[in-house]
Image (cartoon, rainbow, N blue to C red):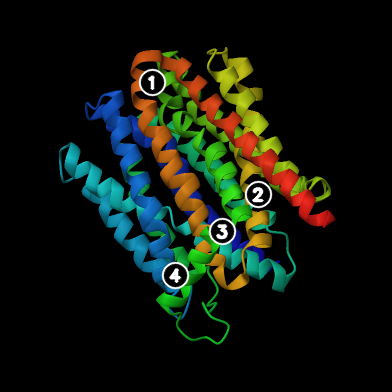
Amino acid sequence: MLSALRLGFYYAAIFVGSGARVPFMPVWFKAQGLSGTQLALILSVPLFVQAVAGPALALWADTFRLRRTPMIWMAVIASLAFAALAVLKGFWWWMVCWGLATTLMATFSPLTDVIVLRRARTDGFAYGTPRGIGSAGYIVANVGMGLVLVRWGPTSVLVWTVAAGLLVAVGARLLLPPDPVAVTGERGRMGDLARGLAHLVRRRDFMLLMAASSLIQASHGFYYSFSTLIWRNHGLGGWSGVLWGFSVGVELIFMWFMEPWRRRIGPERLLVLGGVGAVVRWSALAMSPPLWLLFPIQGLHALSFTATFLATLRLIERLAPAEDASAAQTLNAALAYGLFTGLATLAAGPLFDTLGAYGYWPMTALAVLGVAAALVLLVQQRGSAKA
């Protein structure tokens, strides 16, 4: 259990940064005078970079002897890049600094997942235990940053983000176990890792999973970029942190207490339910509901994000060979949270400028496509089980 707690605290170190950065850095950029379209561009371009850089960084990370070593270096560099946002002024400088920092930070969750999934098997704990502790850290950041923002303004978001990056570096050294990349304890070879990634891309079932996961997760692009601004425009700015925190609180409950139910229905059907939750969620948010109704709608985060994430994690573990675990998890992150979310975020800027909250409707369409891909995968996996 001690192992699960240490890993949970490391997830919390990661998410105490992203829990402030994702919903509130758009407020900082907006305060610098950026339009919705400019904001979408500065948020989306790094996601496209991650689609290529993410797998490349994972392959590079697997050339070290210990899994935690490259994570320490990446966290330090990301913190310096975040800090440079305050020094180097102008749209293009901000894009470079933001792109470098967020590309590096995006690799931490999938690389940590590899460590935690392996430790969960060997040490005998449920993956949801440490991940749920991470979600608690996300809630602290959501609510805490929301209160700090009201009191001290947009600059406080950047200060929090830099400090959180340094916390990730320290946590990697003190909390992560000295697990070797290879069972033999030797350094991995880039050529072998690249061949494993190429093998995954050729597998129809794996890429079908990538399509379903990517479409459903990408449908969050408008929400991540503009939900806080929409709520502020509707006079609910003080509630934004609470609403974000509530959604992740439901996620935490789903991770900690719904494991028996998740195992009973299986990851394929869980993936379908995640997509359906996204369809309902974005359709409801497009109608600009009142505050009291926003809370149950935010509760659908347990399906739209968490169910989709957990189902994808389990299916990757099933479909990808153990030696390709890092490549598989990072490829999913590169596609779902990089390329596809980048496209959705890029489109979100003009949608916000012209349609306001109605910009959620195209996100609903993405989620519908994700459900369709998940249903195809469900049928295919059932057919394989019967064969």
Q: Residues within 10 Å of mark 1 (few under 14, many from 20)?
A: many
Q: Is residue 128 left or right of residue 145?
A: right
Q: Outermost residue, front direction?
A: 387
Q: Nearer the viewer, mark 3 or mark 4?
A: 4
The residue nearer to you, when weighing 116 against 201, is 201
Count the labels in the image: 4
Residue occupying the point 29% across, 53% down: 100
Question: Residue 194 — which label?
Answer: 4
Q: Amino acid at mark 2?
A: Leu
Q: Secondary structure at mark 1?
A: helix
Camera sees residue 287: yes
Question: Compared with residue 206, is residue 369 higher up or lower down, i.e. above or below?
Answer: above
- Compare marks 3 and 4 and give the one earlier in the sequence: 3
Q: Secondary structure at mark 2?
A: helix
Q: Secondary structure at mark 3?
A: helix
Q: Residue beneath label 3, please?
A: 9
Q: Amino acid at mark 4?
A: Ala
In x, y percent, where is residue 327?
50, 64
Q: Amino acid at mark 1?
A: Leu
The Cα atoms of the two marked residues, 3 and 2, are separated by 19 Å
Q: Residue beneath label 1, please?
A: 351
Question: Residue 310 — which label?
Answer: 2
The residue nearer to you, when weighing 230 against 347, is 347
The Cα atoms of the two marked residues, 3 and 4, are separated by 31 Å
Residue occupying the point 65% across, 49% down: 310
